[in-house]
Image (cartoon, helix red, strand yellow):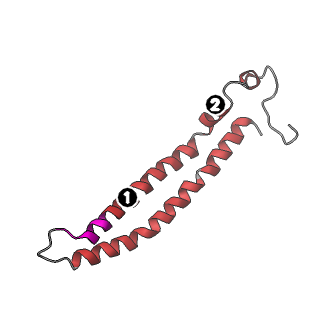
Amino acid sequence: MTKKDMAVVVSRALALYPLCWIFSEITYIPTVLFSLTHHTSHQSVLAARDYFSDMDVLSLALRVFRSVTLLGVAFWLYFCGSSMQRYFWRNGDAAEDSGAAGSGKLSLAE
């Protein structure tokens, strides 16, 4: 397995963590929506603002923002294998990557 292949596999494996976190965040959205509709339907005409409604709106906005951000991180990790390889092996392995010092393959024996 070459270093580039290993970097691609590792970056794609790391992309699974934000995807699982997104799934966890999305499962809470129906609960927040239900709470928001409950608090807005029982809101008093005399009260200009309701604490619980504001809290639910903020919670929903933060969950959506967190999910979108994590989706961006997951896409970046999924498609950044070659840039990770350049970052981690940029200085010492330049000769090896060009083929002058070796094959550039990694094995368990190394």
**Residue 6 lies in quadrant:** top right
Q: In screen coordinates, is 2 left or right of 33?
A: right
At x 34% / y 59%, what residue is drawn? 61
Residue bearing mark 1: 62
Proximity of marks 2 and 1: CB atoms separated by less than 8 Å: no
Q: Residues within 10 Å of mark 1 (few under 14, many from 20)?
A: few
At x 50% / y 63%, what residue is drawn? 23
**Residue 62 lies in quadrant:** bottom left
Report if residue 51 lies within the magenta region: yes
Question: Which element carries disc 2, helix, strand or loop?
Answer: helix
Q: Name the amino acid, label 1.
A: Leu
Between the C-alphas of marks 2 and 1, the distance is 34 Å
Q: Position of residue 50 (x, y in %)?
A: 22, 70
Tell me the chief SS of the magenta region: helix
Question: Which element carries disc 1, helix, strand or loop?
Answer: helix
**Residue 66 lies in quadrant:** bottom left
At x 62% / y 39%, what residue is drawn? 81
Which residues are the magenta region?
49-57
Quadrant containing the N terminus is top right
